[in-house]
Image (cartoon, rainbow, N blue to C red):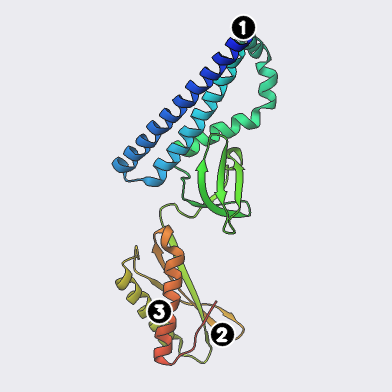
Amino acid sequence: MSPGLLHALSVGLTLALLLAGYHIVQRLIDRLVQRVAARQHDTARSRTLGSLLTSLIRWVLACAVVVLILRELGVDVQAIVVSAGVLGVVIGLGAQALIRDLLTGIFLLFEGLVAVGDEIQVGTATGTVESVGLRVTKLRLPEGAVRVVPNGALTEFTNFSAGWARATVEIAVPREVDVDRALALLREAGETWARATGAALDAPTVQGIMRFSAGDAVLRLSVRVDPSRRVEAENDLRRRIKATFDREGLSAVGV
């Protein structure tokens, strides 16, 4: 058997072993994620941990594949490593953005600032976090597109899924309507919704006239809810408010 064929077989076997090892490690990561989720009751954080570990394993295996293939081809890997050390400063100057992305990804995970499934806003883009890697974070936008954001760009962002969210509904009533009566009906609708759904984290708050719009008085109802239920809560509150005002014969328009 020719030396070239032996090298090719050796490279193929090495790649097969590394691929098998990757699948084994991936299964171990999945089991780790499931255990963390069951122990800490935090599915989002565990999925983020799994996403980051998977990204790390891919980078490590990619480097290992390059080194092993070069060794099988007869390339002096040690000389390359020494050269890399000499050129490290030069390369580092051009890789500052990459290093910043990697460090930011690590801190995002361990500080719990963002997790898979969170709804965040980065600049003008708002979407749901699908994965947090070592270098980039992927957002699924409302229209279905995927936005890839370098982790280094996540120095300032808004997380709508952290802790709690405030569901807010504003309605406009004609000026001739008794405002006190309208506020009482607004409070009634909010309290009825809170008792029926159990989604309120505190008592609904009804505020007075927030402003005037096109001759109407704008009133506001707000309540703290779980972030994942904010949109659902606002839609349900609007429905109940309309039903309550219709029952009393008052007109109200959503703002």
Q: Are marks 2 and 1 in contact (CB under 8 Å)?
A: no
User: Foreground residue, 238 or 222?
Assistant: 238
**Tag shown at residue 3:** 1
Residue 27 image point, x, y percent: 39, 33
Q: How crowded is mark 3: few (under 14 residues within 10 Å), some or many (20 or more)?
A: some
Image quarter for residue 229?
Answer: bottom left
Vertical position of residue 200 compared to residue 156: above or below: below
Q: Name the residue under label 2.
A: 216
Q: Which of the two discs, 2 and 3, labels the residue nearer the N terminus?
A: 2
Residue 156 in sight from this viewpoint: yes
State the separation of the CA atoms marked 2 and 3.
21 Å
Locate the N terminus and report the quarter of the image it occupies: top right
Residue 49 image point, x, y percent: 43, 37
State the separation of the CA atoms marked 1 and 3.
79 Å
Residue 111 in sight from this viewpoint: no
Q: Look at the numbered disc 1 and give the secondary structure of its residue.
A: helix
Left or right of 29, for residue 125: right
**Tag shown at residue 176:** none
Q: Mark 3 points at which residue?
A: 240
User: Foreground residue, 175 or 128?
Assistant: 128
Q: Look at the numbered disc 3 and give the secondary structure of its residue.
A: helix
